[in-house]
Image: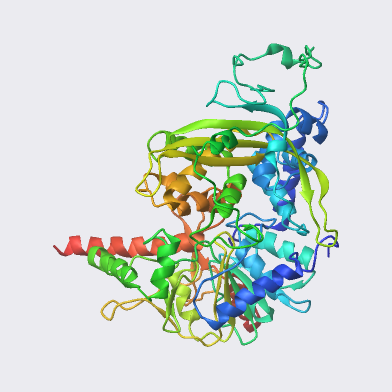
Amino acid sequence: MSGAYNFAYLDEQTKRMLRRALLKAVAIPGYQVPFASRDMPLPYGWGTGGIQVTAAVLGQDDVLKVIDQGADDTTNAVSIRAFFRKTAGVATTERTAEATVIQTRHRIPERPLHAGQILVFQVPIPEPLRFLEPRERETRRMHGLADYGAMHVKLYEDVARMGRITTSFAYPVKVAGRYVMDPSPIPKFDNPKLHDCPALQLFGAGREKRVYAIPPHTTVESLDFEDHPFEVQRWDRPCGLCGSTDSYLDEVVTDDQGGRLFCCSDTDFCRERRDRMDEGR
Amino acid sequence: MYVAVKGGERAIRNAHRWLAEERRGDPDLPELDPAQLREQLALGCDRVMNEGSLYDPDLAALALKQARGDTVEAAFLLRAFRTTLPRLLSSVPVETAGMRVTRRVSATFKDIPGGQILGPTFDYTHRLLDETLGGTDAEIAPAAVAEQPVDPVVPRVLDILDADGMIQPEPAAAEGEPTDLTREPLLFPVGRDAWLQNLARGDEGFVFALGYSTQRGFGSTHPFVGELRVGTVDLVVEPEELGFPIVIGEVELTECEMVNQFLGSKTEPPQFTRGYGLVFGHQERKAMGMALVDRALRNAADGQEQRGPAMDQEFVLYHSDNVQASGFVEHLKLPHYVDFQGELETIRRMREAAAREEGGE
């Protein structure tokens, strides 16, 4: 652990400020709480919100897992894991089951999370209404009045023009029956995992200076219509490595002849299944 | 079996080693000392200090060296260091009338008390490449020293107009600590202290381009340079436990006050208004751009019709920060294949449906 910096890099005053914001976020599920985001030694847009949230909740005994695109070995996940190993000296793991804090970008692990775990999402644009209304003053007013008509009109226009809702990631949800929330750019495949999750889910947007939360066992509904119910992505084939038929698949281009390999984006899930297959043999 | 690309700690480590080699360049050439950058690329260091929001010429020079001359990257390095520093106290507001000026010009009056002082400026140089700088140790003819020193107090030009009641009085400074955007989230609408801080930290190119846009009709300023001055001022603090002011050092500043015509309204007589720019070091473009945008934002805050992006608080303040902008734009280099796969799936399903419909017809 490097001596020049406080445990997990941030000073204790900053952590206290963050924890206060997080407590408020937990108290008002889905509500975006402004916080005094700090300049971090990693670039904005590369997980500074998630890193600040992780730094604020991390203790000496925590076991940290960091994933990007579901994988532990993607470059940015490697970099963030190394950052906390260096500044906090905490144990790290690639196993979802063993982690107490999981920082993620773009995925929720396939293996169901359990009580006591904290899932920290990196969020680029926390405002689900941003692409409908660019002005923050206006979107805050819309949330205040639960004025979500514009969002439903957008989804309806999709159905009217394309016959389906075309949003495939960052699919908006309603949390605890009140706030419409951006679940970060996870594929809509992961949206059902947000609902009634036993783990605490925290969201950090560093550049936009917002945190929000889904407390354990909170109702989370993906927005839809009665005649166009919410549905998730599916693949016509199983994972080419572990044979899973119910996980989110990456498409890997294997040659320039149109060859493709479909395999689990959650590398720990895939490994666990392959390990079990090997044992069974 | 195909194994997905391992990002790998080793790849990152090697990439950074290569970067260090590239930074050094040809090892047969002497290595740059940051002090050389501080002295000979001073304006680049000034830009890094402004956008890095930290007045430290030595660290700015080091950052510029480490960033291979990339000023935005250097500002990022400085910011990431600044964020770890404790905030001990706020200084007493600097008194720029007492600035030890090296340059001071006004475009509104031919002669002004204290005089027009050109100082070290690119203005009126002919932009011809100087081949004598191609080697080392070029001979420099020393500049003549004036017979009389500059007055110790050089009154600000706008204070002269102010005495005649020709210029809109400035509102009194708000009580208490000024806003600090590095310690508080940006919540709209913001006050002038917040936007001035935001502009001072903002990207020079962005602020300057916005200022420029107000001159071309995307805004409502009709500016004159009331005064532009460059020089050093004392930095004074007054710790509570001491009860008296002490000078803790000096900083070089560029200050610009723009004068704008205002034709008056039902409640106010015709008069001039001002726009204000203040930045570290010698950064005239930045200070002028800032003064133009300050005026545009004030016009908007005063309820004038919004006539361009420079008058739009959220547009200006959310997009001025190049450390944030570069981070967010450059994060597009990070893997997005999970989301892209989601899009692929959607588009494929839609194409299948479209093909089925065509086939059915």
The residue that appears at 51% across and 74% down in the rendered structure is A243
The residue that appears at 52% across and 41% down in the rendered structure is B275
- Left/right placement of residue B88 relative to residue B259 reads right
Q: Position of residue A262 (x, y in %)?
A: 49, 65
Q: Quadrant of residue B115?
A: top right
Tell which of B37 and A87 is nearer to you.
B37
- Taking B53 as reference, is B22 above or below it? above
Note whether residue A264 is visible: yes
Location of the N terminus of chain B (image quadrant): bottom right
Q: Quadrant of residue A25?
A: bottom right
Tell which of A277 and B154 is nearer to you.
B154
Note whether residue A65 is visible: no
> Which residue, as the protein is rendered here, is positioned at the far left?
B361
Q: Position of residue A6 (x, y in %)?
A: 80, 66
- Left/right placement of residue B166 relative to residue A35 reads left
Q: Position of residue B262 (x, y in %)?
A: 41, 39
- Left/right placement of residue A154 relative to residue B94 reads left
> Which residue, as the protein is rendered here, is positioned at the far front?
B164
Q: Position of residue A217 (x, y in %)?
A: 52, 88
Tell which of B45 and A216 is nearer to you.
B45
